[in-house]
Image: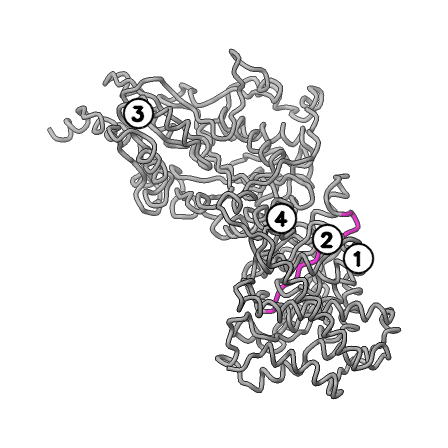
Amino acid sequence: MQNRAKVVDENFTRRVTQGDLPESDIPLSLIDVGLQPVELVELFESQLMSRHLDLLSRLLQARGEAFYTIGSSGHEGNAAIGKAFDYRDMAFLHYRDAAFLIQRSKQLPGETVLHDMLLSFAASEDDPVSGGRHKVLGSKRLYVPPQTSTIASHLPKAVGAAYSIPLAKRMKHDGELPHDGVVLCSFGDASANHSTAQGAFNTAAWTAYQQVPIPLVFICEDNGIGISTATPEGWIAANFSHRPGLKYIACDGLNLLDTYQKARLAAEYARRHRQPVFLHMRTVRLLGHAGSDAQTAYLAQQAIDAAEAQDPLLHTARLLIDNGVMNSSQICELYETMRERTARVAEQVILRPKLQTAKQVMKSLVPPKSQRPAFEPATEAQRSATFGRDQRALAEPQHMARLINWALTDLMLEQGNIVLAGEDIGPKGGVYNVTGKLSERFGKHRVINTLLDEQSILGLAIGLAHNGFLPIPEIQFLAYVHNAEDQIRGEAATLSFFSNGQFTNPMVIRVAGLAYQKGFGGHFHNDNSLAVFRDIPGLVIACPSNGADAVEMLRSCVKLAQEEQRVVVFVEPIALYMTRDLHAEGDGLWTHNYLSPEQSRIPTEGKSKAIKPGEFGQYGEGTELCVLTYGNGYYLSRQAAKVLEDEHNVALRIIDLRWLAPLNEEQLAAAIAPCEHLLIVDECRGTGSISEALMALVKEQLPAELKVKRLAAEDSFIPLGRAATCTLPGKESILAAALSLLCKENPLTVVKSA
């Protein structure tokens, strides 16, 4: 099979020497677009560096010195876009945008882009972007967060970042991005079809249609093919040229002058009108999808030859010659000079150290501490004015939903960079009124009613966080996360890891979830599975069982996000939102008084009221039985405990995990160790639930003689009405499991037997 990289390489020199250069039907000169001859040479050098990096990556891979060969060949025209925009315009880049990054680096003195990119190719721990964790295009100084996406999952956060710029100006928020900035987001034509991308386009247009400013430039680099699947001719233009709220501009990415002119036009439009632009850039794909891609398996040789004949470097060579900037000999000499320079730097770079241990690899999973100054506590006068008519109710015991609302009020009052976002959370206050009055108290800029698209909600949050906001997005029901889980898994949670801690997107994701809602059925509203979160490295998962804990845990979650830049999921058990009673109607034992931030900071009996990450709750000190649980399971276990204590004289303790990830394994083991029996109660399904991890903990860290039983929900979806709890642990099944574990007779069982 013919080596196409070698063919493309040799074709360039041969065709330039012979004057066999492709023509363009775009009659533009340097004067027409406002470029100087030296600037055209500079752009050409960026293209050449990008090309030789692609060629070299294949040679280095053959030697075992490089590990990723998807390159930018055919897309080098994006160098002109790199020149047209300011380096402070945050750019979420397509993986074929090496020339863009190279050109952008020339705006900032002191950049060593060739050396840095080769460190990334070689997976060296000296790589200034990812620290050797991935070959990514990125730079902290150049406002380019590293991307690992190949399916356009970076588009929603680009929309969010663009939205954040005018929001920051309105709120007088001192963020990371300039108030006159725009956001760029590039992707391939095939990715434009992905549902994530379609959601981002729709959100941007939906926002702009309402005259809400969103300075964003989508850049579709259209090479007509996605791996092996062709994009129908005209498809992109037909879909985007007449979309409401989206300005469409097309350019020929093979022609640097046309691309530069149109990119400048896009930049000016987005910056002046603060509205989104769709820049449609024609390109070709050379060298296949990656080094291992055999194009002849799905493309006719004629099609491969035709693409190679349109090499953008050949087009630029024609421009240089036609404008009298360089001759063919000088072009070929510069081409070889760049080859030698690239190879020389590579030989130095491959000697640099690589990551060798798990500890080194995992170092950036947890972001570094934030350097932002601490917020000043709100005054009592501010609190009184904000809470208004709720002042009287503050002194009375309340259920969880209202306590969370008040905690959010105090947090937003104290910390001005907090922004809430979600479906119906504004004037309506959400499905369960948890965010009621917050829009009235803080305005629509800080309590954002979003469109009904979870990918866009989470993308908005990630983008806001890029600009120094602390977003608290709400996912209306746990099951809705599955529509957008990659925004957490593939985008939010990976940013610190793949940027070596340089970029972070801290947030607290509020999720109304879990089961026991008898009025709802199906898998949309009663979802009892947290598996979607549990295997995401670095993610913190909190789940309160009562209102008092919810307040303190939410404050700790926000503290984690603000001070340690963490991504936190705060799971709120819907069935406990309005729960007031524990054992009998009217006992009010599941309501609690609200403690203001100041009251919370005052220790009681020398102990802080704050609930720190990993700190579990405990009811009772008995050692005969330990019940290990969380959320609704803790509430139900407390009900069962009354029977166990009053009627069976069981000396027990119940541990409320509170924090489901990371687990505080050492202290949990110490709390369980004195006990003779352990019952794990998990309201989530047996398969994939946290009870599996707890069983592993027991096996690995506790004595073999400890008698253990696990009670989890059945591996089933939740039905409607009276059958809603059939598959779930309940007071009676917890009681039965405990008595069975203790080898004690269950009166209910005796009655049924009789």
Which residue sits at x=39%, y=32%? 632
Amino acid type of the residue tagged 2 in the rendering: Leu
Q: Is residue 179 magenta?
A: yes
- CB contact under 8 Å: marks 2 and 3: no
- Disc 4 from disc 1: Cα separation: 29 Å
Find disc 1 in the rendering and name its residue.
Answer: 107
Residue under circle 4? 460
Q: Position of residue 485 (x, y in %)?
A: 50, 50
Image mark for residue 733:
none
The residues tagged by marks 1 and 2 sit, at their Cα atoms, a distance apart of 9 Å
Most foreground residue, 38 or 6: 6
Identify the residue shown where x is 74% and y is 88%: 18
Report the Cα–Cα distance between label 2 and label 4: 22 Å
* Local crowd size for mark 3, using a 10 Å CA cut-off: few (<14), some (14–19), many (≥20): many
Q: Which residue is mark 3?
A: 640
- Which residue is labeled 2 in the image? 142
Q: Earlier in the sequence, mark 4 or mark 1?
A: 1
Contact flag, marks 1 and 2 (Cβ < 8 Å): yes
Mark 4 packing: few (<14 Cα in 10 Å), some, or many (20+)? many
Would residue 553 be counted in the magenta stretch? Answer: no
| Amino acid at dot 1 | Gln
Residue at the top extreme, as displayed: 605
Under circle 4, the secondary element is helix
Sequence-wise first label, 1 or 2: 1
